[in-house]
Image (spheres, rainbow, N blue to C red):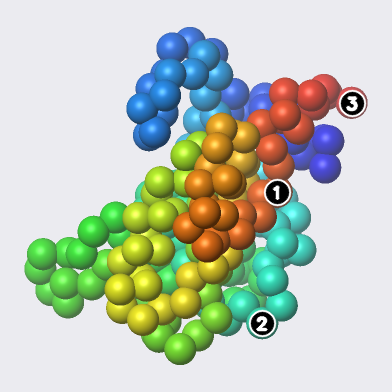
Amino acid sequence: MTKLAYRIKAASEIHGQFTLRSGKISDTYFDKYRFESDPELLRDIANCMVDLIPDGTQVLCGLEMGGIPVVTMLSQCSGLPAAFIRKERKTHGTCNYAEGCELIGRRLLLVEDVVSSGGAIIDAAKMMREDGMVVDTAVCVIDRETGGSEALSEFGITLLSLLKASDIQASTSQ
């Protein structure tokens, strides 16, 4: 896992002044699109994430936009179907916010790339719960350890992470 953490760090960690979705300012940013666009690295991430999928999960639900590549590869590696969750309903066509297979009455797992405040997961879970879906677990590649896990817990969602920001910071090329 240390080697994978280092590969993610080498591919995606950048330094500067960044405003996170939560509004907080950070001097370190994990540019998820850099690890999500590397086919070998994304496959290796998904292969490791398969072990995080709770027993009984029936559908993997990737959150727009960063969760989509992760959920697609995780679906491929696990054999479970994927759904794609938009930030809001479309205003045309089917007017859905969830695309892919049927979700009602199935055991769902939300899939995200990087979690800071947990806000994107909470927003998606609110929409899904309003439609009668049970949403109680999420998985991510990186937990930035900036309060997201705690916020999700307060909202009734358990966050499982492949890596924490501290794991990535501690990783070396060894």
Inspect the image, locate mark 1, and give the three-letter code of the amino acid beneath it: Leu
**What separation in Å lies between label 2 and label 3 (alpha carbons)?**
36 Å
Mark closest to the chain's N terminus, 2 or 1: 2
Q: Is residue 121 left or right of residue 6?
A: left
Q: Which mark is residue 162?
A: 1
Q: Quadrant of the N terminus?
A: top right
**SS for dot 3:** loop
Q: Is the residue marked by circle 2 packed among few (<14), some (14-19), or many (20+) residues within 10 Å?
A: few
- Give the residue number, with chain letter if any, for mark 2: 56
In screen coordinates, is 89 left or right of 167? left
Q: Earlier in the sequence, mark 3 or mark 1?
A: 1
* Left or right side of 90 for 130: right
What x and y, as percent, mark residue 117? 47, 39
Foreground of the two, 18 or 74 = 18
Residue at the disc numbered 3: 174
Label 1 Cα neighbours within 10 Å, binned few <14 / some 14-19 / many ≥20: many
Labels in figure, total: 3
